[in-house]
């Protein structure tokens, strides 16, 4: 199971990657809320549905021999939607609350990263060449997106900042991370995981700003409309990236 893959299947960490990550996680928030609340499917049933979607997409990703934008971002969306309903199920249905839920998820993510490092002697997110390393990568992403949802809910509801205030706070922290990336020698892997976790509540709170009622600090666009907008944006970016990746080969042919 530790056999090296022939190709690195993880996209480059460019600006496009982070834009697509934010779109995918925002879609995960609006899509998760659409199924669990708007369509009244419930948190547990929605979690089972989205977790099944995650298993299907991640199986395809693990079997793939190269980076396929549509497949990779389908897994990211599936971890975001599953993360949304998993977090809501823990915090609301089980009654753990946002603080305890976030603490449990932080601990789980730290343990996953620790086991990953002990097993692979690396936490690289740009050059994953073993099956085990990729498996740890996707488990960590699933838990980081679930944690991001809980953190976003904590900031928006329990902290008193509201959706817009939380979004502004997270945006400010993300700017500091960008500055740290260019101006300091802090581990790039550490900065990646902090940014990866925080882009989830950024997307979640941004999704809430779009979908929630005005009295709750939102724009009341609805989960259906907001989800459709981000499906279209993400689809356009995936098409662009797919063509962009193939362009050198097409020109050389």
Image (cartoon, rainbow, N blue to C red):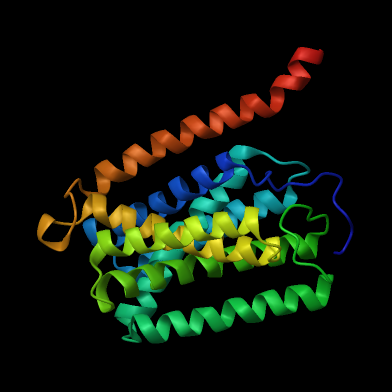
Residue at image position (75%, 66%) is 123
Residue at image position (56%, 54%) is 178
Left or right of 45 in this view: 156: left
Viewer-side residue, 247 vs 165 = 165
- The correct choice, above or below, for 153 with respect to 181 in the image is below
- The correct choice, above or below, for 148 with respect to 21 in the image is below
Give the residue furthest to the left.
215
| Residue 75: % across, % down | 57, 52
Viewer-side residue, 117 vs 174 = 174
Which image quarter is the N terminus in?
bottom right
Viewer-side residue, 242 vs 210 = 210
Give the residue furthest to the front.
183
Residue at image position (65%, 67%) is 190
Viewer-side residue, 99 vs 143 = 99
| Residue 64: % across, % down | 73, 45
| Residue 82: % across, % down | 45, 62
Res 188 quadrant in image: bottom right
Residue at image position (58%, 44%) is 17
Regarding residue 49, the answer to whether it shows in the image is: no
Number of numbered tags placed on the structure image: 0
Regarding residue 101, the answer to whether it shows in the image is: yes
Which image quarter is the C terminus in?
top right
| Residue 6: % across, % down | 87, 45
């Amino acid at each position: 199971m530790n056999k090296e893959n022939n190709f690195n299947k993880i996209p480059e960490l460019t600006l496009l990657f982070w834009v697509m990550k934010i779109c995918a996680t925002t879609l995960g928030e609006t899509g998760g809320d659409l199924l669990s609340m708007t369509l009244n499917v419930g948190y547990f049933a929605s979690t089972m549905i989205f977790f099944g979607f995650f298993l299907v997409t991640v199986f395809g990703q693990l079997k793939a021999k190269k980076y396929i934008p549509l497949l990779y971002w389908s897994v990211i969306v599936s971890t975001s939607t599953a993360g949304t309903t998993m977090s809501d199920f823990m915090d609301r249905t089980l009654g753990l609350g946002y603080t305890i839920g976030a603490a449990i998820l932080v601990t789980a993510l730290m343990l996953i990263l620790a086991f990953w490092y002990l097993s692979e002697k690396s936490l690289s997110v740009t050059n994953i060449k073993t099956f085990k390393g990729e498996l740890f990568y996707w488990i960590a992403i699933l838990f980081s997106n679930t944690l991001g949802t809980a953190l976003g809910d904590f900031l928006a509801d329990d902290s008193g900042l509201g959706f817009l205030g939380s979004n502004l706070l997270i945006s400010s922290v993300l700017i500091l991370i960008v500055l740290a990336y260019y101006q300091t020698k802090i581990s790039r892997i550490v900065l990646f995981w902090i940014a990866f976790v925080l882009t989830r509540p950024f997307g979640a709170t941004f999704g809430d700003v779009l979908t929630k009622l005005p009295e709750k600090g939102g724009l009341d666009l609805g989960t259906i409309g907001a989800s459709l907008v981000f499906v279209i944006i993400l689809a356009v970016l995936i098409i662009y990236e797919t063509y962009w990746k193939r362009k050198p080969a097409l020109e050389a042919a």
